[in-house]
Amino acid sequence: MKSTILDVTARLLLPWLFFTSLFILYRGHNLPGGGFIGGLVGASGFILLVMGPGLEAAKRALRVDPFSLIGVGLLLAVLSGIGGVFMGNAFMAGLWLPTFSLPLLGTVHLGTPLIFDIGVYLVVMGFTLAMIFSLSEADS
Amino acid sequence: MGVFITILGLLVFAFFAPWIHRIAKSYTGWLFALIPASGFAYFISLLPAINAGGVVQYSIEWFPALDTSLSFYIDGLSLLMGLLITGIGSFILIFAQGYLHKHMLQGRFFSYLLVFMAAMLGVVTSDNLILLFVFWELTSISSYMLIGYYHGNEDARRKALQALLVTGLGGVALLAGVIMLGLASESWTVSALLNGSFSAAEHAWYPYILVLVLLGAFTKSAQFPFHFWLPNAMAGPAPVSAYLHSATMVKAGVFLLARLNPALGDTMSWTMALCGFGMVTMLWGAINGLLQTDLKSILAYTTLSVLGMLTMLLGIGTDYAMKSALIFLLGHALYKATLFMTAGSVDHESGTRDVKILGGLRAVMPITAFAAGLAALSKSGFPPFFGFLGKEYVYKAGSYLDQFAPIILIAAVLTNIILMSLALKAGVHPYWGKLNKENYPKSPHEAPLSMYLGPVVLAVTGLLIGMFPGQLVTPLLSPAASAVAGHPVDIGISLWHGFNLPLLLSILTLAGGLTLFALRRRIWYEWSQRIKPPFTFDDLYMACFNGFVAVAKWQTRLLQSGYLRRYLLITFTASLVLISYKLSLFGGIPDNFDLWSANFIEWATAIIIISSLIVIVKTQSRMTALLAMGVTGFGVAIVFILYGAPDVAITQILVETLTLVLFMLVIYRLPAFRKLSGVKTRIFDGIFSVSVGLIITLLVLKAQNLDIAPTISGQFGEWSYLEAKGRNVVNVILVDFRALDTLGEIVVVGIAALGIFALVLKGKGENS
């Protein structure tokens, strides 16, 4: 059953959901949010596309293979931990840039835990989409 | 340092061996031989220092927190073994070049062999007990690869697995023994065990340590009743048999006994165990060897016999016995490696190893015949070969004993007579007599340089050190014997000791051996036909093996039935039993909870969750059940919000939504929703699930007011901003404090995605 309302809504919501997910990812360090939740929200935009316009549209919008997201995410997560080793610390020990202020965002802390969280974000998003894509592919 | 570099070098080259082989082609073996050769040179350079009574130690930190370091300890015994491993190893690599020439997987073979060499060097030079065990296991694993090198052959695979399982079993025992030894001595180094500050014999754990360590050593050195794997290991190529299963690896067990002799030895149980098992192995190997007609089998059984003799000598434990054990060990390594290599050459160039066919090869393989002949003479104990000394000292060690001297001497003479006849069979018989070319599968011819270089050098070495023992052997063996005995022992070796009992026994041995050799055809054609053992130890092993597999199959069928229902039952029953047991320990039902203090929102949430559960149970439609499940999930999310866990609540809501979507995708693929189970099953299921739910509820309530250990949540809250610059403690824990856990989790998630992908794909393939 084709629903025009769902199609249009899905297409409209996709960028909003995507940017919201990035926002949730970033704010996670101080407020509820983070890579896991962000990844799920990020995936949900594309899932809406699968349910509305269809699998092909969702794949086109994503541009990359969900498994690449998982791979890149794992790579980022591991790399984020290696920095600490070179500083003579333990694997996964956090490294931080000096804090600075930006309009809108306020005080900004950038460090390896954020890179790690981006890795988590990508893995969770990739996993969810890989599952949905392969199941709906099997469905068709 | 040198040892560490040698081991590291071997491992690095092992990794690249297949690629190097592609470039170096027929020079690979010669090239690789340079690595152990330089190790040999290094060991030689240590000789003066070691001979002066010193030891060489080198250590790098590995796991300092676990008392495990890459530490090496070289004394006389390590030096002797190191020289054998690197010296013989060089020639084995060259020999393998010729023997496996143009074999498809030759590069891989070199790789395994180099790994083995590194592991073996590690075993004999490790100072740290755990490191010793690691190398010990690595020898078993590389041995498995090497025995099973002809992996297309099912029999070779079975025999390789057998060797791995038997030595692996011993390895596990050894690990337990080493750990107990480490705990008992409160130090994890070999050097601490040797310096005399720890006396294991007085420790309460001594019997356990002894049994476990002996299990490790006996399986490795193929002592009765674990002997059966060694003759089977001859399924490997000739270089493997020559190197692993005669000259080095099987001596690892003997080495371990010698190494630990100062710490564990000199007790009644040690002496009895070593002498007893050693003597049985010695006789068993010799007598079985008589009946063999395969050149390699003959040699395998003589190796078995010699390993038994070495174990027995170590058990006797006198200075003389130590000396003779080391002389025998050195002599045996030299001539046995030679004989195995020449046997390999004969097999390679004439196409058969059957002694009934072999004969007269001297005419076409003169150099191989020369080396084999020298080795056989040494092995049979003719003066002035080194083998003569070995035997002579065995008799000396026996005759100076207070107790058991007659038994040991009789057993030793008997064994040596048989061993001598076997040596002549393996080293003389194939080359002398009449050459019947038409009997051979292929026209026999001389082996290439790579294949006779090693045998000739080793055999000539055996002759030279026998002629000049004082100059060539004493400096090497004296520190080794001192290391084994735990106090300085001087080896004054000379060929001539005057007329005495040992010399008489030597003459008796020579005469007996020659007679037995003359009778060889009668033994092969008549006796070996008549003697049929009721069972072999190999059969016994197979019975155990099959029994083990049968039990594994049975319990797999029981537990991994493939029914989701049964999995859930097993999982929940186990949790139920364990949790109830633990709860009862803590006083059962929690006392201080007040149902009526809940407020309106809490009551409302509870009612929503419970009513949706009733809907799930009662509904006739899968769709309704699914939606009601979603309601339950959202109810739980409200609970999380009520108790101040917004992160968890958000996650719960998102996961709940996505699960619903996922279910929607697959729901149409499921069969129609029908009630299949009967009334009884449903009643059982009802009671079962209610009790699981009840116990979990009790657990949660109980957990509230138990104070087993101080909680860490306060600390995490405090550190979160100060140390990790984040105010959201949940997130900081996930990405910083416990980032390693999270990393593990997302790896699992990634693998799960691949698994689902494969499953869905497979389902698709089957449908179409």
Image: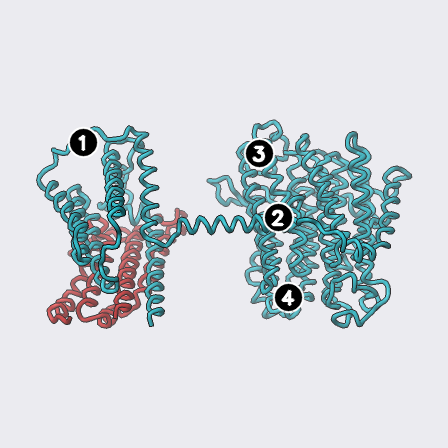
Judge if badges 3 and 1 mark residues of a common chain: yes
Q: Which residue is mark 2?
A: B540
Gap in angstroms between the C-alphas marked 2 and 3: 26 Å
Chain B is shown in which shade? cyan
Q: Which residue is mark 3?
A: B208
Amino acid on which the number 2 mark rests in the picture: Leu
Q: Which residue is mark 1?
A: B593
Q: Quadrant of the C terminus of chain B?
A: bottom left
Q: Earlier in the sequence, mark 2 or mark 1?
A: 2
Judge if badges 3 and 4 mark residues of a common chain: yes
Across and down, in percent, residue B77 comes to 68, 43
Which mark lies nearer to you, 2 or 4?
Answer: 2
Q: Which picture quadrant has residue B746?
A: bottom left
Disc 1 on helix, strand or loop?
loop
Residue in the picture at 31% in, 54% down: A116
Q: Earlier in the sequence, mark 3 or mark 1?
A: 3
Q: Which residue is mark 4?
A: B28
**Chain on which label 4 sits:** B
Disc 4 on helix, strand or loop?
helix
Q: Earlier in the sequence, mark 3 or mark 4?
A: 4
**Residue B212 appears left or right of A27:** right
Given residues A133 and B41, the one toward you in this image is A133
Across and down, in percent, residue B736 comes to 31, 48
Shown in red, the chain is: A
